[in-house]
Image (spheres, rainbow, N blue to C red):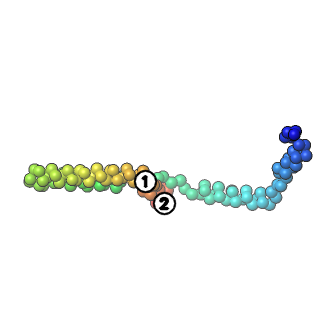
């Protein structure tokens, strides 16, 4: 049995079948170019925007609030053990807020959802 891996006829048929002769019409080319130019012009008309990410704001506000409550507990509660206990709970809640923010960053798109976009003209986007 002869192994003949090259056949002239088969090779010619494959070459003819993969040959690309179909060219798009000039009208289709012009319509696609016009659509592309319109999209480019629309993109250039949109003013540049600045983005300000506020993902850290809830964490900072939580921490500041509970640190102030801890300071108030230390100042206003006369019983030393009770004031330290209340301040410790406030510290714990503040640190838990930091941990929850870190978990939120890892699990969700918190940075994207808490972003403000400001156009160059000063309008909020």
Residue drawn at x 88%, y 43% is: 7
Query: How far from the left and from the top, in percent, is residue 35?
Result: 70, 60
Q: Nearer the viewer, residue 21 or 12?
A: 12
Furthest residue toward left: 78
Residue drawn at x 75%, y 60% is: 31
Report whether 17 appears left or right of 87.
right
The quadrant in which the N terminus is found is top right
* SS type, badge 1: helix
Report whether 60 appears left or right of 39.
left
- Label 1 and label 2: CA atoms lie apart by 26 Å
> What is the quadrant of residue 109 in the picture?
bottom left
Residue drawn at x 43%, y 53% is: 107
Q: Earlier in the sequence, mark 1 or mark 2?
A: 1
Residue drawn at x 48%, y 52% is: 50
**Mark 1 crowdedness (10 Å alpha carbons): few <14, some 14-19, many ≥20:** few
Residue 9 visible to the viewer = yes
Query: How far from the left and from the top, in percent, is residue 85?
Result: 16, 52
* SS type, badge 2: loop
Q: Which residue is mark 2?
A: 125
Query: How far from the left and from the top, in percent, is residue 94?
Result: 27, 52
Residue 64 visible to the viewer = no
Q: Which residue is mark 1?
A: 107
Report whether 4 appears left or right of 96.
right
**Mark 2 crowdedness (10 Å alpha carbons): few <14, some 14-19, many ≥20:** few
């Amino acid at each position: 049995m002869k192994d003949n891996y090259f056949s002239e006829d088969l090779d010619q048929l494959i070459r003819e079948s993969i040959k690309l002769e179909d060219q798009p019409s000039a009208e289709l080319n012009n319509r696609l170019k016009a659509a592309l130019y319109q999209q480019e012009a629309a993109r250039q008309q949109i003013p540049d925007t600045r983005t300000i990410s506020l993902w850290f704001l809830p964490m900072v506000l939580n921490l500041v609030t509970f640190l102030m409550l801890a300071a108030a507990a230390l100042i206003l509660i006369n019983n030393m053990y009770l004031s330290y206990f209340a301040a410790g709970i406030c510290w714990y809640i503040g640190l838990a807020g930091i941990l929850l923010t870190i978990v939120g960053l890892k699990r969700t798109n918190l940075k994207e959802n808490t972003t403000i976009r400001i156009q160059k003209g000063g309008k909020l986007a």
